[in-house]
Image (cartoon, helix red, strand yellow):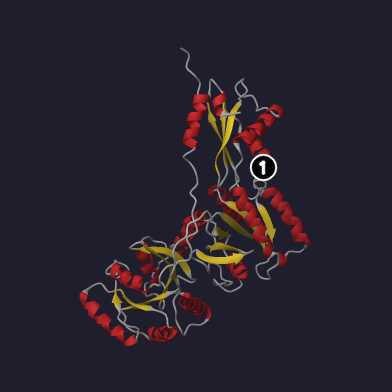
Amino acid sequence: MSAGEYEDDGGWIEAELADLATDTPEERADEGPLPVVAVVGRPNVGKSTLVNRIIGRREAVVEDVPGVTRDRVTYEANWRGRRFTLVDTGGWDPDATGMALRIAEQAQLAAELADVILFVVDASVGITDSDEAVGSVLRRSGKPVVLTANKVDNQLQELEANELWSLGLGEPHPVSALHGRSSGDLLDVVLDALPETPPVVFGAARGPRRVALLGKPNVGKSSLLNKVAGEERVLVDPMAGTTRDPVDELIELGGKPWRFIDTAGIRRRDRELKGADFYAAMRTRAALERAEVAIVLIDASEVLTEQDLRIISLVIESGRAMVVAFNKWDLVDEDRRYYLEKEIERQLVRTPWALRVNISALTGRHVEKLVPALELAIDSWGTRVSTGRLNQFLTELVQATPPPVRGGKQPKILFATQASTEPPKFVLFTSGFLEETYRRFIERRLREEFGFAGSPIEVTMKIREKRKKK
């Protein structure tokens, strides 16, 4: 039955439908690969500050402490209409050991994969032994290098920056990343060094599906990303909090490209965080907003915690599709499996629709099952039910189980439509208020009839206003 067939209510319903028609998700086309600019340099020379200046927003974590940035972190930048990928890296110190050595290795790898290298030196300090060592590696790389003299705030410092000619990397370009001085001139030089971008071919195909990896600290998010990538893309360390910036990585799985976003662990009380950890938590939430589906990692060898439940609630509130991956399954014995099932039945009773995969990021056990789970969750997230089929289903449902009486009257469902997808949202046009328990009943039956595995769905009401008596 169509909305217009209700003679007394058709005008109201059709007006509401016209408003809903404007709420459609935006389709993004796959625009192909962009040229890559890697920002490298020794620790604490202002690389992340320069990245924030170039992209025009405070995105990279900045703190006056060496070693805040630890992984390769990518951002999309645009200058004079030319788009390119900007890669922020950790401090590159050739004499580093331990964690610092692994950060330096990630920075060197970023330089090897880049089209242009932005080498940042602290002009207020001058050339150090580390600068000379990094410069020597860059000269042998054969890549275009733009030498950047940072922290230059006046003409006198600009003259002093000329000593950087001795690095043998060409003309030093003085800038102040903090205040923006000469940053436009620097970007002009970067554009001149970029390779030509292949022509963009627009089509119906979407870009790589975006997957956010979420979980409490040290649950194995970075280990999982490295496992699916087949190489060490991000740092893994027993110390919790190794990842601070969301790390985007393009990975091919199941013959398709996927964009995985590794995030900082979400802690119990973000309001108590300070400095880099506070901003890292904010960026984790922003990364979830950019994703289409979230993999929530839970340590299967430990009891489900309040943190785990908060993260699942965060994904539900964001409206993203969800796959719950119980990690460290190789550490789970028969007794733990029994108690884990009881915990899931008791604490995840409101999210039975979330897809579940038992994996081990360390050994690779059942990691291949993630792809079909992700594909099913995203398909459900974008599912649309035709209006005719939806109303036929609800008519049969209401006849079998009418809504509970409220205030002496039984509300009626006059019409229903799916307002949008990603996530699926259904609007019920009613003659009265439907109790929450009945709306949950409708949601459960919608899932039984149409699927929606791995995707949240929303059921809302639009109640007909009472007509005033003449």
Q: Nearer the viewer, residue 148 or 378?
A: 378
Question: What is the residue that sits farthest to the left in this orientation?
Answer: 155
User: What residue occupies the far top of the structure in this picture?
Assistant: 470
Query: How many residues crowd mark 1 within 10 Å: few (<14), some (14–19), many (20+)?
Result: few
> What's the residue at 51%, 21% (across, down)?
466
Q: Is residue 245 left or right of residue 181?
A: right
Q: Is residue 248 visible?
A: yes
Image coordinates of residue 412 in percent, x first then y, are 61, 25
Task: Identify which amino acid the numbered label 1 is placed on.
Answer: Phe
The x, y position of residue 172, in whole percent, is 30, 79
Q: Can residue 431 be seen from the camera position used here?
A: no
Q: Quadrant of residue 447?
A: top right
Residue that carries the numbered disc 1 in the rendered image:
450
Q: Position of residue 90 (x, y in %)?
A: 45, 74
Quadrant containing the N terminus in the rendered view:
top right
- Count of numbered badges drawn on the protein: 1
Image x and y of residue 347, in percent: 66, 49
279 is higher (above) or lower (below) than 96: above
What element does badge 1 sit on? helix
Residue at 37% across, 60% down: 57
Closer to the camera in the image, 318 or 98? 318
Please tell me in which quadrant of the rendered image residue 303 appears: bottom right
Location of residue 301 (image quadrant): bottom right
Residue 433 vertical position relative to residue 363 in the rendered view, above or below:
above
Name which residue lies at 50% across and 63% down. Answer: 246
Look at the picture and state if 78 lies above or below 460. Answer: below
Residue 401 versus residue 385 in the image, above or below: above
